Amino acid sequence: MKRTRRSLRLVLAALLGVLLLTACGRNMFDQPRVDAFDASPFFADGSGMRPIPEGTVSRERGALEPAYLTGMGPQGFLTELPIDLDVDVLLRGKERYDIYCAPCHNYNGDGRGMVVQRGFPQPVSFVDTQRLLDAPVGYYYNAITNGFGRMFSYASRVRPEDRWAISAYVKALQLSQNASVSDVPADVLSQLTQTEAAR
Ligand code: HEC
């Protein structure tokens, strides 16, 4: 009996302690700061935000190059990559393509990825449809950015630079999937046949 009363007292004391420790004011919530677009009596123009100094230039890539962000120039879809093409760009494009596109478009671009095998509408093959073989690199960039028919946009998930890398990789995939042994340079071919023979 005595013991239960003592533990009850302990619990009460602990509860009281917790109550005393809890902050009661709301001053953590209501901080004396100005949020974006808030009005403020502090400045003469009544706005909390300050006007941007004249001549300010955004440092975000593409701010001055709409074609880089949209994939379209005055002549329509860009036919050339607006970034420098090297092996690293293609490897990055392959990595991103395998993550974001291959589930539907498949690793080889034939449009029979796993999601399609599970019932999603099948897209046209990138690698044996003449219309898509002829499509410029900006066409791919545009589809990733804005979506295409039943395919949703990847703008929120894939950064512009990576969209260009993926688009470059799709063009490379089209070449590689339609290449024949005679397209392989002789020295690389002999290396490949040696590796094959060594197996
Ligand atoms: C969830 C499945 C899915 C994913 C993931 C996906 N797509 Fe698609 N994509 C489709 C479907 C389905 C279509 C055809 C839509 C239609 O015709 O309504 C399509 C169409 C396209 C087209 C236009 C083809 C044409 O017929 O002109 C391009 C280009 C394209 N996708 C590129 C990509 C790229 C690049 C990625 C990766 C960033 C990607 N897609 C990711 C399902 C997908």
Image (tube, rainbow, N blue to C red):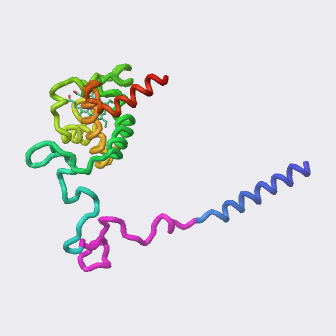
User: Is 38 in front, or is 168?
Assistant: 168
Q: Nearer the viewer, residue 136 or 189?
A: 189
Query: In the orientation shown, which residue stands out farthest toward the left?
Result: 75
State which quadrant residue 111 falls in.
top left
The residue at 34%/34% (across/down) is 187
Specify whether residue 91 is painted magenta: no
Where residue 69 sits: x, y (%)?
22, 50
User: What span is colored magenta in the figure?
Assistant: 24-52
The residue lying at 75 percent from left, 58 percent from top is 14
Front position in the image: 40 or 83? 83
Quadrant in the picture for residue 51: bottom left
Residue 102 lies, with reference to residue 96, above or below; the image says: above
Instruction: Please tell me whether residue 194 is drawn above or below residue 158 in the rendered image.
Output: above
32 drawn magenta? yes
Q: Main secondary structure of the magenta part?
A: loop
Q: Position of residue 176 (x, y in %)?
A: 28, 30
**Residue 190, percent across and down?**
37, 29
Picture coordinates of residue 153 (x, y %)?
Answer: 28, 39
Of 198 and 101, the residue lying toward us: 198
Seen in the picture, residue 128 relative to 64 is either above or below; the reply is above
Tell me the residue at 18%/53% (across/down).
66
- In-image side of 31 versus 161 (left or right): right
